[in-house]
Amino acid sequence: MSADNWRICPKCLENVSTGRSVAIEKAKASYGTVPLEDFQKAMDKAKALPQEPDDTLREDYELGVDEDGVFFVNYSCSCHYCGFSFKFKTTQKALQ
């Protein structure tokens, strides 16, 4: 079964941004305490980390009005990479 949509996972984006920042700060902190070549390698490696993850968030959704006149929304998303997931479901009587 295919997904309704794929997009960037907010948790993965947070993890990538934090991981890259931490790696750059760690490399900067090593300046002057390690050989220049090692410092440059660490900076290059940190800067090469991705700034944005791939589309790993699967979204599935359904909305409409059923034969009883009830409006419904079903939404779920999950990321197979980091394990993030979210579900939302609501109904409301459309016929008064």
Image (spheres, helix red, strand yellow):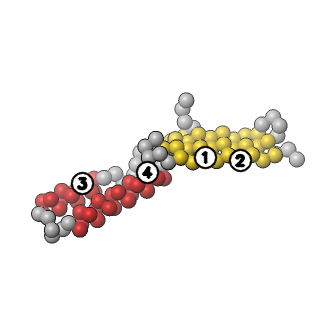
Q: Are marks 3 and 2 in contact (CB under 8 Å)?
A: no
At which x and y percent is residue 29? 23, 68
Residue mark closest to the camera, 1 vs 3: 1
> Which numbered tag is attached to residue 90?
2
| Callout 2: SS | strand
Identify the image quadrant of residue 64. Answer: top right
At which x and y percent is residue 75? 62, 44
Can residue 15 be seen from the camera position used here? Answer: yes
Side of 52 relative to 57 (left or right): left
Residue type (three-letter) at the residue carrying disc 3: Lys
Query: Could you tell which of marks 3 and 2 lies nearer the N-terminus?
Result: 3
Give how far apart the Cα atoms at labels 3 and 4 are: 19 Å
> Which numbered tag is attached to residue 87?
1
Relative to 74, residue 21 above or below: below
In the picture, which quadrant includes the N terminus?
top right
- Residue beneath label 3, please? 45
